[in-house]
Image: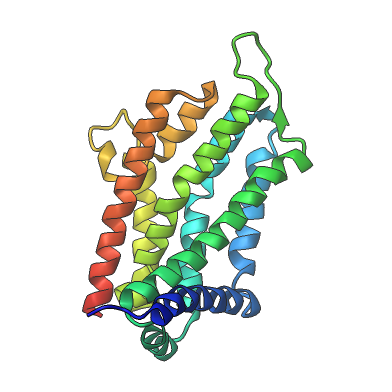
Amino acid sequence: MSTSPDVAVRAPRAVVGLARMRTEAFVRSGRVLAPGLAALIVLGVAYGGGAAQAGEAYGYSAVVLFPVVAAQTQMLLNTEPDVQRRISLVAVGGLRREVLAGALAATVAALAVVAVALVAPWLIGGITGPQHADDPSLAEGFAAGIWANLLLLPPAVALGALASRAAVGSTGLGLAVLASGSVLGYVVGVRDSFVWWLGPPLLSTARSTVDGLDAAALLGFTAQSLLWTAVVLAGYGWLRRRN
């Protein structure tokens, strides 16, 4: 059975429309203030000790902002009442599109946090250039920092989705999932650990950006981040189908 061109055109518009509605609801309800303030506080503390080279500074801020982005995703997805979410599911034509709309809205919100994380250090004097001859250049450090922030964005959004009320059924259980997932990432997501593959490469990423970009680290950590994201999203999809 073929899909008519009109339906094919309406489907992406419905997904984008639902994503826009969820983003606007998150902002207008005031829930955006909590993760926004948390991000500013974390960045203020991170750069309050003095200036650091771009790669090191951005790598560290990406790691400490991981739970903030995850919590923001959870809050955004929890903004919509359960009844409204079921109506939205029917309106966009199925669970897959409804999940995609939520992921799109959460990613846009997460990119806003990343943008703040990239700009804020310059405003408070948190970035410095190379201090020694063998230090990476400012451009290389900046590129490594952007990579670190974008690398940790997908697993943070995935963890926040998994901790949402739509997946686990209650806000309390969602907070437990959020906290345990964040702790797991910090504890096991290090290459020196024999269970490093159980979490996203949080601390490993921060360490790797100190010396600039390295091709092997870039490919390895990117693959680990995307694989962990895929596994968590698969669990989120399974829970959504059950609920």
Give the image location of residue 207, x and y in percent. 47, 28
Give the image location of residue 156, x and y in percent. 43, 54
Indicate the quadrant where residue 98 lies: bottom left
For the C terminus, the quadrant is bottom left
Indicate the quadrant where residue 137 lies: top right
Indicate the quadrant where residue 110 lies: bottom right
Tell how many labels: 0
Task: Look at 22% across and 80% down and name the residue there.
Answer: 1
Task: Look at 35% across and 82% down and name the residue there.
Answer: 93
Give the image location of residue 33, x and y in percent. 64, 68
Relative to 81, say whether 77 is above or below: above
Task: Look at 57% across and 55% down and name the residue there.
Answer: 111
Task: Look at 46% across and 74% down and name the residue there.
Answer: 15
144 relative position to 230: left or right:
right
Relative to 25, say whether 227 is above or below: above
167 relative position to 120: left or right:
left
